[in-house]
Amino acid sequence: MPAAAYAGKECVCQFRRGICDQTCVRDMLDTPFYIACLKLAGRRCLVVGGGEIGLEKVEGLLACDGDVTLISPDAVPALQELAAEGSIAWERRAYAGPQDLEGAFMVIASTDDTDINIAVYNDAERRAMLVNVVDVPPLCNFILPAIVRTARWPSRSRPRARRRRWPSG
């Protein structure tokens, strides 16, 4: 849910202005970010939300060899395929709270439920873990830049979890 969806509603960002006036989004351009590349191989990465946006995030994590767990009662067919073939773990249920974050390196919330997204953010922040609520910068302690792909992955060649074998010697 884009940050603009909060305009006029209760403020959820660090400014706690009562009614959201989008100050936090305007200020994002002035926020200095430390650019880093993350090694995800073998690290548990959670995605909460099984829609098209969740699929996009899962594909990106798999492309970087993340150990991906999807938490969602439902999922789009492509995510169901990834679970069926064993590329991701799928917990077919709603987000249940901080216990879902046990052992996770990062979490990405991509649901269409504002309350769930806020709960994921708050639970992750209390654990000082990486959290991104898609398209809501104030509910992120890291952001994911847009990636421009010149070609769409064909459905049969979507990124899969894999183990790399390094040459010996």
Image (cartoon, rainbow, N blue to C red):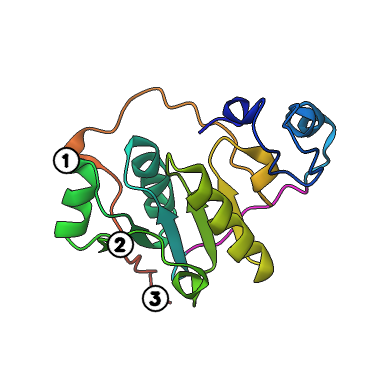
The part of the chain drawn in magenta is 34-40
The residue sitting at 37% across, 53% down in the picture is: 62
Give percent across and percent down for residue 63.
Answer: 39, 50
Residue 156: image tag: 1
Q: Identify residue type, mark 3.
A: Ser
Q: Is residue 29 magenta?
A: no
Q: Is residue 36 left or right of residue 93?
A: right
Give percent across and percent down for residue 91.
Answer: 28, 64
Prevailing secondary structure class for the magenta stretch in the rendered image: loop
Q: Sequence-wise, which precedes: disc 3 or disc 2?
A: 2
Residue, disc 2: 162
Q: Identify residue type, mark 1.
A: Arg
Mark 1 residue element: helix
Q: Sequence-wise, which precedes: disc 1 or disc 2?
A: 1
Q: Is residue 80 left or right of residue 19?
A: left
State yes or no: discs 3 and 2 in contact (Cβ < 8 Å).
Answer: no
The residue sitting at 67% across, 68% down in the picture is: 126
Q: Identify residue type, mark 2.
A: Arg
Q: Sequence-wise, which precedes: disc 1 or disc 3?
A: 1
Q: Is residue 36 magenta?
A: yes
Q: Is residue 42 left or right of residue 92?
A: right
**Above or below for 134 versus 9:** below
Give percent across and percent down for residue 51.
Answer: 32, 40
Residue 168: image tag: 3
The residue sitting at 82% across, 38% down in the picture is: 31
**Above or below for 115 versus 105:** above
**Above or below for 166 versus 27:** below
Mark 2 residue element: loop
